[in-house]
Image (cartoon, rainbow, N blue to C red):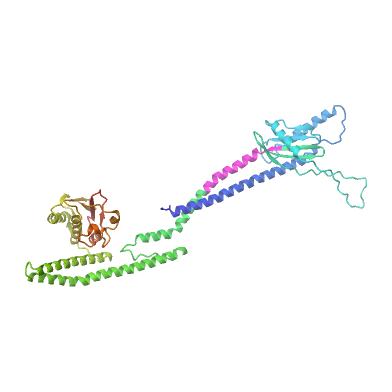
Amino acid sequence: MKLPSFRLRLALLSAALAGSTLVGFGAVSWFQIYNAKISRLDAELLNHLMRATPNFPPPEEPPVSAASPQRESSRHRERWQFYEDSLSYAFGTNTKTPVALLVLDTNNNILYQSNSLPADVEVNRLLLKRLQLTPLAPSPKREPPPLTSNRNPSFEPPPLIRPRPPQFVTEQTATAVWRIGAAKFPNAQIAIAVSLQAVDQEMATIRNIFLVSIPGALLLVAVGAWLVSGGALRPIRQLTGVIQQVTVKGLDQRIPIGTTDVEFVELIQVFNLMLSRLERSFTQASRFSGDAAHELKTPLTILQGELERTLQQVEPGSEVQQRLSNLLDEVRRLSGIMRKLLLLSLADAGKMSLYLVEVDMSELLMEMLEDVEMLAPQLTVQTDFIDGLRVKGDRDLLIQVLQNLFSNAIKYNLTNGWIQIRTHQTPTNFHVTIINASKDIPLSDRDRLFDRFYRGDPSRNRKIEGIGLGLSLAREIARAHRGDLTLDLTSSGQTAFTLTLPVKLQN
């Protein structure tokens, strides 16, 4: 299975890591901010509970007259109403915060309760419940008198009232969420509920900021990781580019190490050493094939000449003449192999010399057709080309290419098969396609058809002459002309080769 781009995976993994970190940081920060706001609200609630003590009526104040209790009750209610109104603006916001207040005396009689909220009944129930759960304050304790010589025995300090620290809870009604605190004093009980609407709005704003900023930060991280990984992988791309240029003529390529990161130095050094070994081995192999072809060329020429002269001196039709004729054919075959090996070694070294002339390709194709009619008269030949198709090239080498293509079209054709020749010329290139009826070429053979000494399935080629150098040499000749020779994709039952040559060869 092919994995996606390493650079893309690196960018995505960086974004995922940064995303998980940012999400965790945002969640922790949000809860910390929320807890800090609740703690500050609890501190303010405690402060206001403690400040409510002066509003309590004296525990033992006798009534002045019969109408005094009513007037005193009205006066205390107005005081608590004013106190409740002041609380609405006392919890750190610029807007009025919904607040509920409940005040009871020591006998659990209601001295004051809020009646301005839509959910007063439910909130007052929660306040009453909280007061019932709040423990009583401890008995007043007197502080020991200071040890001074001028102590007045008639002076008694007032008892120090220390109620238990109130417990704050969060309760929810049908319309809002409340933070409730309650405290009990010797002469009264008080409970305050503050709506968390303002806190929730602030936290919603912070959450929205996180929801907008985190994706933006992730995008920046992904883009930054993409750019950084691209810079980090630059030596790999450079190495890939050099590998793509490693051909027979590009074995002298080397990657400079001067500006390479330390992590890639060893890899590049190993690759450069591998190129050096390949260049040395290929040079030795090419030199050996070229030297062997040169060394064998002279003895084979002498042997061929001696056989031809001896063949003329023996009795015609004799057994000796037949054996000499067979030997002469094999010598000529060896000479042909030597010529091909010599040309291939020159092509490998980039030293294949071309004698450039204007070549009439229409004339060469007509000559090839005459040979086909003579060598394989049973084949049907169809042509589609015009006269005057000319290119710039080496005539002898181009003849060798066409001879190889037509020879293969004859050797690998079917019984009573056919051959088609099609040409096409553009202002820059000349194309000739030779198609013949044949058995289907397996995909494994198609990829290696131009390899040297490769002849495909031996069962198919056992009775066909050749050593597997023709197509390889033909393609090298085409490429020496700045052209190419390719095997085309065709329908079943046929094979097609296309020779492409530039109309004007650039030196």
Q: Which residues are magenta?
A: 193-217
Residue drawn at x 30%, y 70% as measured from the top left: 284
- Image quadrant in which you'd find residue 343: bottom left
Residue at position x 44%, y 58% in the image: 233
The vertical placement of 283 against 140, above or below, is below
- Our reading of the magenta stretch's main secondary structure is helix
Pick out the residue farthest to the left.
Answer: 315
Residue 208 seen: yes
189 sits left or right of 199 in the view: right
Q: Judge whether residue 507 can be spotted in this image.
A: no
- As drawn, is 158 to the left or to the right of 409? right
Image location of residue 86, percent across then percent down: 73, 36
Q: Is residue 322 above or below residue 43?
A: below
Q: Report x, y in % for residue 227.
A: 46, 54
- 338 lies left or right of 247: left
Q: Quadrant of the C terminus?
A: bottom left
Q: Position of residue 425 (x, y in %)?
A: 21, 51
Q: State the image coordinates of residue 448 (x, y, percent, origin top left).
A: 29, 58
In the displayed structure, 33 sits above or below 356; it is above
Using the rendered view, name the quadrant where residue 202 is placed.
top right
Residue 464 located within the stretch drawn in magenta: no
310 and 230: which one is in front? 310
Is 204 in the magenta? yes
Front residue of 277/372: it is: 372
Q: Residue at x 17, y 68 (%)?
A: 331
